[in-house]
Image (cartoon, rainbow, N blue to C red):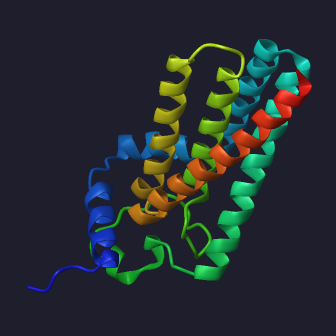
């Protein structure tokens, strides 16, 4: 038996994770994948940031978060259109392997996951934004990173992404979030 390639491992991990679906869990994963729900959560977090940090610093952090999400989303779309890796729900091998995809089929290309990138970028920049007001914000940090991980995993469970797509999206989102949080922190220091 030949060893699996990275792509082969990615396909096998994706099929294995996706195999744990049920009609009930499909409904839950669809909620995590629904971007409309995110906007309400994003708005609530941004209002809390302004209340915690004051309008000037809070608004600076909010602008940093918005720029981070926009950059994450646009750059992931650019990479998708450049790499052109088909999503698993468009791949005969994956469908024949038992892939579950209860959603309408999304756009053709999926590398790397915008959902994972955007959510982890938001999680990191918002958490670091709360920390700028003093304190460690452990509970918020725990909750927002668990939420981001569940959103990312939902994309595999919905058959929209390979595991590697969400892994790269997560790493990209964290790197971009860290970079933008550093930039935001520099602006905050000038406001002091």
Reply above or below: 60 against 175: above
Measured along the vertical axis of the image, is residue 55 above or below residue 186? above
Which quadrant is home to the C terminus?
top right
* Residue 61 % position (x, y): 79, 31
Q: Position of residue 84 (x, y in %)?
A: 58, 81
Residue 34 visible in rendering: no
| Residue 31 in the figure: left or right of residue 100 | right
Which residue sits furthest bottom? 2
Image height of 109 relative to 131, above or below = below
User: Which quadrant would residue 131 be assigned to in this image?
Assistant: top right
How many marks the image carries: the answer is 0
Q: Estimate the x, y position of residue 94 in percent, counting from the top left.
A: 34, 75
Q: Residue at x 65, y 52 (%)?
A: 176
Q: Position of residue 21 (x, y in %)?
A: 32, 50
At a point 52% along the width and 40% down the height, the residue shown is: 148
For the point 70% across and 57% down, the residue is 73
To which quarter of the image does residue 122 belong? top right
**On the picture, is 35 further left or further right than 102?**
right
Residue in the picture at 64% in, 73% down: 79
* Front-most of residues 3 and 181: 181
**Farthest residue toward the left?**
1
For the N terminus, the quadrant is: bottom left
Q: Nearer the viewer, residue 33 or 77?
A: 77
Left or right, 23 with respect to 137, comes to left
Q: Is residue 86 visible?
A: yes
**Position above or below: 121 against 93:** above
């Amino acid at each position: 038996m030949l060893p699996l390639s990275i792509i082969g491992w990615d396909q096998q991990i994706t099929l294995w994770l996706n195999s744990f679906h049920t009609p009930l869990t499909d409904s839950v994963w669809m909620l995590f994948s629904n971007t409309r729900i995110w906007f309400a959560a994003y708005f609530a977090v941004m209002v809390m940031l302004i209340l915690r940090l004051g309008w000037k610093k809070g608004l600076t952090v909010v602008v940093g978060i918005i720029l981070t999400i926009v950059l994450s989303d646009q750059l992931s779309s650019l990479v998708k259109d450049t790499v052109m890796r088909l999503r698993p729900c468009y791949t005969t091998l994956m469908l024949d392997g038992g892939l579950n995809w209860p959603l309408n089929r999304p756009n053709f290309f999926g590398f790397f996951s915008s959902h994972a990138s955007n959510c982890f970028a938001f999680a990191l920049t918002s958490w670091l934004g709360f920390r700028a007001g003093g304190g460690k914000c452990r509970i918020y940090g725990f909750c927002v990173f668990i939420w981001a991980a569940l959103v990312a995993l939902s994309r595999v469970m919905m058959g929209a992404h390979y595991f590697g797509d969400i892994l790269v999206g997560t790493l990209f989102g964290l790197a971009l979030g860290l970079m933008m949080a550093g930039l935001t922190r520099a602006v905050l220091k000038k406001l002091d």
